Image (cartoon, rainbow, N blue to C red):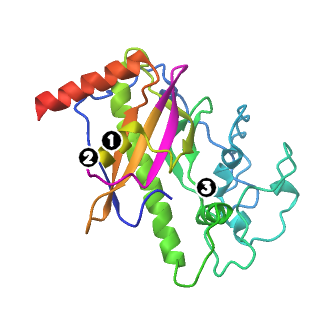
């Protein structure tokens, strides 16, 4: 969870548009579709073969599309059947069963993002309400009657997904600086949260009298074979505000990133 209830706002960058990717890029090829699970009504005998798994795929992404296309398979929360067991680790789908003592049922449906997952031919898939609930429990959170309702969980998932979509749009604006180097566009390799590991920029803003971010993510982007780290700070929009402000920028991991930051700072200063 990266935001209180509300909408998303992010400061745009004055950069060239990405334009249309060349014809040789993956998005101009036939989209790889996974076959719906046999129990789904939309299942047809002619459905295409599920693509082979990619090495080092996060476990929560390996079978994610099953819950995009046919979420009712896990909605009952019963004991998983043989087709549900992942032969790679003999485990059921992750985090899709109600927790002990859960006060109400939650959706297990997952939404596909617009963020390409590196080396997979697919996009990242967002967690379901049930997965998010279970993740909060693992982090030590415990439900109390006045804390949260089923409607709140629906809103939390919507805002979580909105924030990630906006963060990716901001990353694409930075990546427009490297369009010649990576004409097909970047993809997301992995990511992680560092909520209490404040960046020097966030600390400097705090010394200047601003609030610290309530969350931070580091995203590792695959720029046509080159790994590039981006830092995302999440700020409340302010008192009485209902949006989240995202501060997205490449980390100071290379001279190239430093140069990118300098160019954008100059563009912002001269265009203001």
Residue 220 located within the stretch drawn in magenta: yes
Residue 187 place in picture, x, y as percent:
51, 31
Residue 52, image x, y percentages: 73, 34
View extreme (front): residue: 207
The foreground one among 163 and 236 is 236
Q: CA distance from mark 3 to mark 1?
A: 42 Å
| Crowd around label 3: few <14 · some 14–19 · many ≥20 (10 Å) | some
- As helix, strand or loop, the secondary structure at mark 3 comes to helix
Can residue 171 be seen in the rendering of this structure? no
| Location of residue 215 in the rendering, given as x and y in whole percent from the top left corner | 46, 52
Give the vertical position of 241 relative to 92 (above or below).
Answer: below
The residue that label 1 is drawn on is 204
According to the picture, the residue beneath numbered tag 2 turns out to be 208
Q: Report the residue at 39% width, 37% height from top.
A: 200
The residue nearer to you, when weighing 215 against 203, is 203
Q: Earlier in the sequence, mark 3 or mark 2?
A: 3
| Magenta range | 209-229
Q: Residue at x 49, y 44 (%)?
A: 217
Q: Secondary structure at mark 1?
A: helix
Q: Quadrant of residue 82?
A: bottom right
């Amino acid at each position: 969870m990266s935001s209180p209830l509300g909408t998303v706002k992010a400061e745009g960058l004055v950069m060239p548009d990405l334009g249309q990717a060349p014809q040789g890029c993956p998005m101009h090829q036939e989209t790889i579709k996974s076959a719906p699970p046999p129990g789904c009504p939309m299942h047809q005998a002619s459905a295409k073969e599920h693509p082979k798994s990619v090495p080092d795929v996060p476990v929560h992404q390996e079978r994610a599309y099953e819950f995009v296309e046919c979420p009712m398979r896990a909605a009952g929360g019963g004991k998983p059947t043989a087709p549900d067991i992942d032969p790679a680790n003999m485990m059921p789908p992750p985090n899709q069963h109600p927790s002990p003592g859960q006060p109400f049922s939650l959706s297990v449906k997952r939404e596909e993002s617009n963020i390409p997952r590196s080396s997979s031919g697919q996009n990242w898939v967002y967690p379901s309400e049930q997965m998010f609930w279970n993740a909060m429990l693992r982090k030590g959170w415990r439900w109390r009657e006045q804390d949260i309702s089923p409607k709140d969980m629906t809103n939390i998932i919507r805002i979580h997904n909105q924030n990630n979509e906006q963060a990716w749009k901001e990353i694409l604006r930075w990546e427009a600086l490297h369009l010649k180097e990576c004409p097909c566009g970047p993809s997301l390799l992995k990511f992680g949260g560092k909520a209490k590991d404040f960046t020097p920029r966030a600390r400097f803003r705090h010394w200047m009298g601003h609030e610290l971010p309530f969350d931070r993510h580091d995203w590792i982007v695959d720029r046509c074979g080159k790994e590039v780290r981006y830092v995302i700070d999440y700020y409340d929009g302010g008192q009485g505000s209902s949006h989240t402000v995202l501060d997205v920028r490449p980390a100071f991991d290379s001279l190239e990133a430093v140069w990118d930051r300098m160019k954008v700072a100059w563009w912002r200063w001269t265009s203001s």
